[in-house]
């Protein structure tokens, strides 16, 4: 088979895989989650195997410990977070009323100074907005069924994910060996080398970034709770959890935290402290946590991560968000490999190969 036919074969396979992921994205979530759990717990299973555990027993012990720990954390945090969510919902009407009383007079004075032509443009824009609002409400009503589907998806996530994780973790070495046996023989060493690099990149990023998110969630949650911010723990944990998206966690937490603080406190001191907590967390993330816990060895630029997450979410929904970082790691490693080969090729040097 010529190189052109080989390239066409792999491109065709990639296109088919992307089409299948797109068509099946609504049911892939528990399988992707189970695969992620199995992938990151496989080193623990290998360690237990080295200490005379059978693979099945090691898998059972690890998954039981993992899901019991997750359930215990949810059981501890859920009642507290539930109360904070309720408190936040109760605050929304007051915040809206406060904005109405503060902002509406300013808008009225502004409108009084506008010429008639500008007012006509504003009225037309308001009509367009009203039409879009009605459409949004209609879509929301039509989406009630989607909410029911989402409930069943969540139920399948809770039921199917542990099953998928168990079988994948138990058979992980067998699966990887079988895939290795399918590799084309001549380029197999190069392919294995790139897979190892992908594995190192992905594992280092996820372990390091998970540590960063955990530390920031503790800093934000504890700091906002000590200030006395209503729903402070909820805001802090949420900001820390989404800190794997560069700068988004601190920016979102700062906006929400300041909005609640301005409504809650009459004194400026706690408002300034809330802002200082997020600025301190962002500074620590940029100059201490990310360099030490993630480092430059990962090779995933923040802009590339943001693009991958947005693209994955736009194309495949929440499943695409879960797949975004692994796919970004694969593309990054392959891009560096391709650039390295290009820099050693006649396309770069001219003439014969420079190997």
Image (cartoon, grey):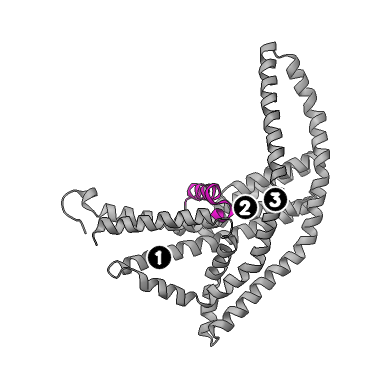
Residue 260 occupies which quadrant of the picture? top right
Residue 296 in view in this figure: no
Quadrant containing the N terminus is bottom left
Apparent side of residue 89 relative to residue 120 in the rendered image (left or right)? right
* N-terminal-most mark, 1 or 3: 3
**Residue on which the image places disc 1:** 195
* N-terminal-most mark, 2 or 3: 3
Q: Is residue 263 above or below residue 241?
A: above
Q: Residue at x 67, y 21 (%)?
A: 124
Residue 59 in view in this figure: yes
* N-terminal-most mark, 1 or 2: 1
State which region is magenta: 301-321
Tell whether position 55 is magenta. no
Apparent side of residue 69 relative to residue 354 in the rendered image (left or right)? right
- Most extreme residue toward the left is 351
Q: Position of residue 321 (x, y in %)?
A: 56, 53
Q: Residue at x 48, y 62 (%)?
A: 202
**Residue on which the image places disc 2:** 242
Q: Is residue 112 above or below residue 101?
A: above
Prevailing secondary structure class for the magenta stretch in the rendered image: helix
- Secondary structure, mark 2, is helix
């Amino acid at each position: 088979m010529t190189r052109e036919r080989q390239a066409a074969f792999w491109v065709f396979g990639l296109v088919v895989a992307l089409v299948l992921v797109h068509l099946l994205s609504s049911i892939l979530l528990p399988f992707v989650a189970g695969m992620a759990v199995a992938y990151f717990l496989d080193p623990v299973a290998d360690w237990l195997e080295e200490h005379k555990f059978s693979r099945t027993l090691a898998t059972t012990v690890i998954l039981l410990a993992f899901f019991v720990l997750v359930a215990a954390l949810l059981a501890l945090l859920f009642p507290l977070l539930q109360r904070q969510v309720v408190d936040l919902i109760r605050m929304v009407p007051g915040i809206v009323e406060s904005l109405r009383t503060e902002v509406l007079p300013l808008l009225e004075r502004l409108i009084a100074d506008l010429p008639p032509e500008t007012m006509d443009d504003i009225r037309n824009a308001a009509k367009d907005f009203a039409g879009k609002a009605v459409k949004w409400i209609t879509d929301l009503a039509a989406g009630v069924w989607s909410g029911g589907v989402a409930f069943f998806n969540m139920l399948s996530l809770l039921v199917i994910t542990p099953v998928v994780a168990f079988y994948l973790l138990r058979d992980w070495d067998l699966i990887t060996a079988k895939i290795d046996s399918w590799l084309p023989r001549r380029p197999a060493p190069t392919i294995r080398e790139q897979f190892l690099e992908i594995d190192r990149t992905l594992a280092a990023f996820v372990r390091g970034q998970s540590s960063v998110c955990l530390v920031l969630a503790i800093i934000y949650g504890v700091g906002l709770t000590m200030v006395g911010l209503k729903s402070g723990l909820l805001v802090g944990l949420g900001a820390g959890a989404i800190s794997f998206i560069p700068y988004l966690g601190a920016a979102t937490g700062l906006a929400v935290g300041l909005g609640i603080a301005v409504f809650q406190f009459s004194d400026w001191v706690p408002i300034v402290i809330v802002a200082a907590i997020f600025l301190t967390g962002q500074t620590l993330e940029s100059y201490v946590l990310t360099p030490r816990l993630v480092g430059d060895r990962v090779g995933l630029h923040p802009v590339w991560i943001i693009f991958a997450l947005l693209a994955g979410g736009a194309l495949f929904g929440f499943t695409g968000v879960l797949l975004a970082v692994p796919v970004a790691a694969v593309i990054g490693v392959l891009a560096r490999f391709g650039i390295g080969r290009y820099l050693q090729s006649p396309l770069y040097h001219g003439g014969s190969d420079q190997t």
